[in-house]
Image: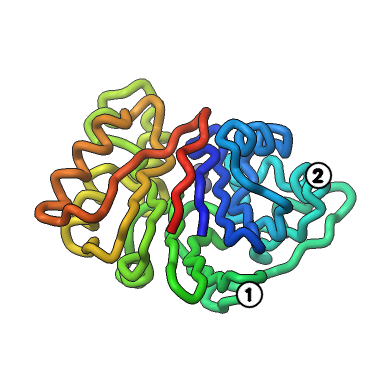
Amino acid sequence: MLITVLGSGSSGNATIVSSGKTTILIDAGFSAKTIQKRLQQIHFPLSQINAIIISHEHYDHSKGWKSCAKCFDAPVYMTEGASQLLQSEGKKNSVTIFQTGRQFQIGDFTICPFPVPHDSSDPTAFIIENKKYSIGIATDLGYLPNLVKNYLNKCNMLILESNHDPDMLKNGPYPWPLKQRIMSRLGHLSNDTVRIFISEYIDEKCFYLFLAHLSRQNNSPELALSTSLAALGSNKVTKLLTTHQSNPTEIIEL
Ligand SMILES: [Zn+2]
Ligand SMILES: [Zn+2]
């Protein structure tokens, strides 16, 4: 299983999970051209993309979905809520609708979508698994309900939002209503929420944990990493990394 986060943050999100035979793009927050460029940048061995799955309709997760569907000639999966909003105008593309709580199969992978608290229509996170390993992908959620924590703590790899440092956000330049939205239970996860989750739920079966969707204004990779690192305690197995907005991560092999 090969995994790379091609970019993550408020300017765009896209992750690739591949078995070699089956390759899935999760979120199309960049144009097909940018996605191809970033795959080439890290020499990702790609023959084709077999499916595109959209987590929710926000622009930073969906803006390239039509160009990606056309360019990669791949079917697009999204919830009914996302489809209604993304297809409200003009010519309708054909999409496959999935429901949270109902798993489905794409080639070598089982996809288990589950609901997360966020201010969009049907916001979704995913567990993607093959016979041996499972990956959790959860960005854009205001807090971690028990249901979500129980999904994520079984994974061998996690891509989890660590959006902001609460003090930087409070003292930063954003207007108050936007600060309130980000801090709310339908907003984005803070470094501190992730730190507590790691200390209570993450053990040695999680080999890689990517801190994702970092805010450029209200966080820094160093701060996100140091906050979470302390929570790992005696766990020397889990490798902590951050995703980037403008560059792909290294390729992780599970
Ligand atoms: Zn987002
Ligand atoms: Zn969002």
Mark 1 is surrounded, within 10 Å at the Cα level, by few (under 14), some (14 to 19) or many (20 or more) other residues, namely few
Question: On the rendered structure, is 89 left or right of 99?
Answer: right
**Image coords of residue 252 (percent x, y):** 44, 49
Residue drawn at 55 percent across, 42 percent down: 13
| Residue 142 x/y as whole percent | 37, 52
Q: What residue type is labelled 1?
A: Gln
Which of the two residues, 48 or 14, is positioned nearer the viewer here?
48
Mark closer to the chain start, 2 or 1: 2
Q: Which residue is drawn at 70% across and 59% down?
A: 51
Residue at the far top in the pictured view: 173
Residue at 22% across / 31% down in the picture?
A: 167
Q: Which mark is residue 71?
A: 2
Residue where numbered disc 1 is placed? 105
Which residue type does callout 2 highlight? Cys
> What is the x, y in percent for residue 99?
61, 73
| Residue name at image x 70 percent, y 36 percent | 31
Dot 1 falls on a residue whose secondary structure is: strand
How many dots with numbers? 2
